[in-house]
Amino acid sequence: MNASVHVDTAAALREVLAAVVPDLHRLCRDPWTLIGSAAARLAGAEVVVADLDVLTSVRDAEALIGHWRARRDDAYVPCGEERFRSRFARFRFPGLPVEVMGGLELCNERGWEPVQIGEIVTVNVAGLAIPIPALAEQIRILESFGRPKDHQRAAWLKHLSGERQ
């Protein structure tokens, strides 16, 4: 990865985290966690982060949607509606867009099932406590999503964990 992309991604991620994490801690009544590329990056994977994916309860997604309504990007339509459903909203923030997924479910061979995270760890970024799935949980979740970009991120995380692919 070229160094300028690395620096820009890191700066954008720090900027959006500083803008949203205090609100997440203040407004969410239930546990929340980052998932996707931002969580992989915070775990140490050298991935490009396009947005901040926040997994919340439906109740907390509603609270965030109300609080951030002026930032909402109503024109954005997420891909993969046949495989994913949630109380979804995308918001414009400095640095990166933020996507909130309340009560995220994944459609698999057994039908719709909630995306659940067994083990969460906390990382510290500029004094902010940020929950992310443990490495093994991130790999499991990304592989369950089944998209090429998710498999790529899972491969980076496996490399980090020293696991053979």
Image (tube, rainbow, N blue to C red):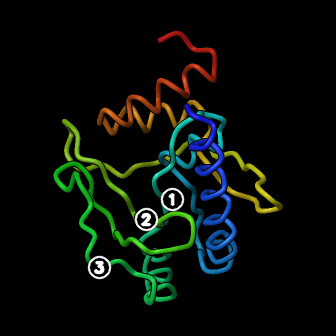
Q: Residue drawn at (80%, 59%), measured in percent from left and top? A: 126
Mark 1 or 3 closer to N-term? 1
Query: Is residue 41 something that shows in the picture?
Result: yes
Amino acid type shown at disc 2? Glu
Amino acid type shown at disc 3? Asp
Residue 27, quarter of picture: bottom right
Question: For mark 1, what is the residue?
Answer: 52
| Distance from the alpha carbon under mark 1 to that under mark 3 | 17 Å
In the rendered image, the vertical position of residue 157 relative to residue 22, given as above or below: above
Residue found farthest to the top: 164
Mark 1 or 2 closer to N-term? 1
Q: Secondary structure at mark 2?
A: strand
Q: Which mark is residue 99?
A: 2
Q: Residue drawn at (70%, 74%), measured in percent from left and top? A: 22
Q: Which mark is residue 74?
A: 3
Q: Is residue 51 left or right of residue 46?
A: left
Mark 3 or 2 closer to N-term? 3
Percent x, y of residue 146: 30, 34
Quarter of the image with the N terminus is top right
Q: Residues within 10 Å of mark 3 (few under 14, many from 20)?
A: few
Percent x, y of residue 79: 23, 54
Q: Which of 70 and 7 lies nearest the eye of the viewer?
A: 7
